[in-house]
Image: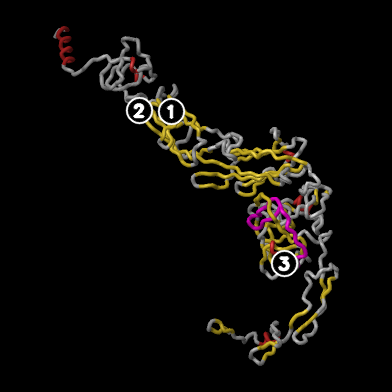
């Protein structure tokens, strides 16, 4: 067959194939018409617009400027995409702090970002080449929240404001489209758990609303974590609290009270103390910082605004550090200053603190009267004993401490304590204030320990109970105290041994009653005389000087009857003579 014959045959075969040639350079469809590559024309092969190029092949392909050779020169290729979130871990729930600056105590310092960055990457699934110019869309629980276009590395991201969202779980979705005709290419998502933190705070140890120059100032605060399950106290990994002047100058570390730079009172509850210094400024404020990654990022921040610092002022009717009294109904109008500073504000217990009476019953502290006999403890002989109340007080105080849920008490009141290191003695939340308060008591000059978590308090049953936390409750409150208790100067409040601050050094006269022997029973009555050898001039605590008397009359192995209504014990010889023979009727049975 000659060349001419071959040429004719090829044309005949091509004419029998249903093939339509059309140049559709302006067509928006790349699948309905057959097209050919325009390489031969050499004018549009690098165009980023698919509508301006001639493309050959039976299906949609990459543009001819792609670095992937499978998508060039009109060779057919199947598009497979791979989407990855690059900003967050898709395999675990991602927890995010909301940090709304407008909510007090959530992010007062504006350190928590108001937005969160969502970033993803679009890749070709076979070669992992980046796919640029893809339209990316982000959603929250299937609601559109933002979009962008992938860059040359296939990356796409948005910054999304989270401050208005409620706490809870959110499904963050990401999908791509390459062009209108392709539609959705792929989608991926991850779960985000939005939480928020709240810091409640208050200053304490203020006088007339001010801090006193040279006395300590205290800040107490708690941090709560709020999520879809509820609200709980929370301990962040990192906490920093700084006392500053109004201008922001930080107090030096030497200004903080030893042991109170940052003291944990309970889960999520803390206290800081500093000594105000008017030479630095007349206002003091607190900045609080919270983080879980060594402050690379913040979960919350808070500020307590300026509090005025003043010197103690005589005559302003406020008992301030360095003053014993300052007018009012409890003392003269002239303030009395105590040498050495400190405060003698009465140490007390809040209302409804149960006090154990000598007979084992209870009476609320506000109901205790002078002359009541309460249960005391003889520390030398290790036994309980009854003591009479000689004096009471009920001052108004600023705040009190919940000591492990065991007892509520003001900061300077001494409680009998077993320290963690084995020492035993009296301890108070604020030992310095307690020592000042006890200058006129038998404890003057003796060690008063700091009461701390892990210490143990002595109970009326002779056991010790451990302190698991110490928590401050601010606010003005009326308190009560048994200011003077005779004999042993202590009593049991809420079941734990407390000192009454009396005894010696002007703590009040303690009666010492000495009684004669009882007279012989005469007509069912006995008498004796009792005298207070300390001559306190009171009958408080005076023992009985008269009592009923009588005797038991027993027949042989019969019943015993009393004479004159006597109800004393059976004679020992009667009990002993029956010891192995007595019968007791118990619910119809007999035990011999």
- Rendered position, 61 above or below 356: above
Report the residue marked by disc 2.
80
Q: Dot 2 surroundings within 10 Å: few (below 14), some, or many (20 or more)?
A: few
Q: Position of residue 524 (x, y in %)?
A: 74, 85
In-front residue for pair 471/307 = 307
Q: Dot 3 surroundings within 10 Å: few (below 14), some, or many (20 or more)?
A: many
Q: Quadrant of the N terminus?
A: top left
Q: Quadrant of the C terminus?
A: bottom right
Q: Position of residue 419 (x, y in %)?
A: 70, 55
The tag earlier along the polypeptide, 3 or 2, is 2
Q: Dot 1 surroundings within 10 Å: few (below 14), some, or many (20 or more)?
A: some
In-front residue for pair 11/226 = 226
Report the residue marked by disc 1.
147
Tell me: 413 left or right of 69: right
The tag earlier along the polypeptide, 3 or 1, is 1
Residue 211 image-quadrant placement: top right
Residue 455 image-quadrant placement: bottom right
Report the residue marked by disc 3.
374
Q: Position of residue 134 (x, y in %)?
A: 40, 24
Q: CA distance from mark 2 to mark 1?
A: 21 Å
Give me the residue at 39% from left, 19% from top.
Answer: 67
Q: Which residues are magenta?
A: 387-410
Mark 3 vs mark 2, foreground winner is 3
- Rendered position, 212 above or below 41: below
Mark 2 vs mark 1, foreground winner is 1
Residue 329 marker? none
Q: CA distance from mark 3 to mark 2?
A: 87 Å
């Amino acid at each position: 067959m000659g060349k001419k014959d071959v040429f004719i045959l090829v044309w005949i075969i091509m004419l029998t194939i249903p093939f339509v040639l059309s140049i559709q350079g302006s067509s928006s469809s790349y699948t309905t018409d057959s097209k050919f590559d325009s390489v031969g024309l050499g004018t549009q092969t690098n165009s980023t617009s698919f509508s301006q190029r001639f493309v050959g092949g039976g299906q949609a392909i990459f543009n001819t400027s792609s670095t992937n050779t499978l998508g060039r020169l009109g060779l057919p290729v199947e598009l497979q995409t791979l989407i990855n979130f690059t900003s967050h871990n898709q395999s675990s729930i991602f927890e995010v702090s909301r940090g709304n600056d407008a909510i007090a105590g959530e992010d007062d310092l504006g350190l928590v970002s108001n937005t969160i960055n969502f970033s993803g990457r679009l890749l070709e699934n076979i070669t992992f080449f980046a796919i640029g110019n893809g339209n990316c869309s982000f959603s929250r629980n299937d609601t559109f929240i933002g979009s962008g276009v992938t860059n040359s590395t296939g990356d796409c991201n948005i910054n999304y404001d989270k401050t208005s969202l409620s706490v809870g779980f959110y499904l963050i979705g990401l999908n791509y489209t390459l062009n209108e005709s392709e539609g959705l290419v792929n989608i991926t998502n991850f779960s985000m758990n939005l939480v928020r933190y709240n810091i409640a705070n208050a200053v304490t140890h203020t006088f007339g609303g001010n801090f006193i120059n040279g006395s300590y100032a205290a800040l107490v605060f708690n941090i709560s974590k709020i999520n879809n399950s509820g609200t709980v106290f929370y301990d962040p990994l990192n906490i920093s609290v700084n006392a500053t002047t109004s201008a922001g100058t930080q107090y030096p570390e030497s200004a903080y009270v030893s042991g109170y730079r940052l003291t944990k009172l309970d889960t999520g509850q803390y206290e800081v103390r500093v000594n105000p210094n008017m030479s630095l400024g007349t206002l003091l404020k607190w900045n609080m910082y919270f983080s879980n990654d060594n402050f690379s990022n913040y979960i919350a921040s808070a500020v307590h605004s300026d509090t005025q610092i003043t010197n103690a002022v005589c005559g302003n009717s406020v008992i301030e550090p360095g003053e014993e009294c300052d007018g009012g109904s409890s003392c003269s109008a002239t303030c009395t200053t105590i040498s050495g500073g400190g405060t003698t504000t009465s140490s007390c217990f809040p209302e409804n603190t149960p006090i154990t009476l000598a007979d084992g019953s209870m009476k609320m502290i506000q109901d205790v009267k002078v002359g009541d006999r309460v249960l005391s403890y003889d520390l030398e002989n290790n036994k309980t004993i009854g003591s009479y109340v000689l004096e009471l007080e009920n001052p108004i105080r600023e705040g009190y401490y919940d000591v492990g849920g065991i007892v509520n008490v003001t900061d300077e009141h001494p409680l009998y304590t077993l320290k963690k290191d084995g020492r035993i003695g009296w301890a108070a939340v604020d030992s310095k204030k307690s020592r000042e308060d006890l200058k006129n008591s038998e404890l003057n000059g003796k060690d008063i320990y700091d009461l701390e978590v892990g210490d143990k308090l002595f109970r009326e049953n002779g056991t010790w109970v451990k302190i698991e936390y110490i928590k401050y409750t601010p606010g003005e409150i009326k308190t009560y105290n048994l200011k003077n208790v005779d004999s042993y100067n202590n009593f049991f409040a809420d079941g734990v041994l407390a000192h009454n601050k009396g005894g010696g050094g002007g703590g009040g006269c303690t009666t010492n009653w000495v009684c004669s022997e009882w007279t012989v029973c005469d007509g069912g009555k006995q008498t004796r005389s009792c005298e207070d050898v300390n001559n306190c001039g009171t009958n408080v605590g005076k023992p009985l000087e008269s009592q009923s008397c009588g005797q038991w009359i027993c027949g042989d192995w019969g019943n015993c009857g009393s004479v004159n209504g006597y109800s004393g014990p059976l004679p020992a010889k009667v009990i002993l003579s029956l010891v192995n023979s007595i019968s007791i009727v118990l619910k119809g049975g007999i035990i011999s």
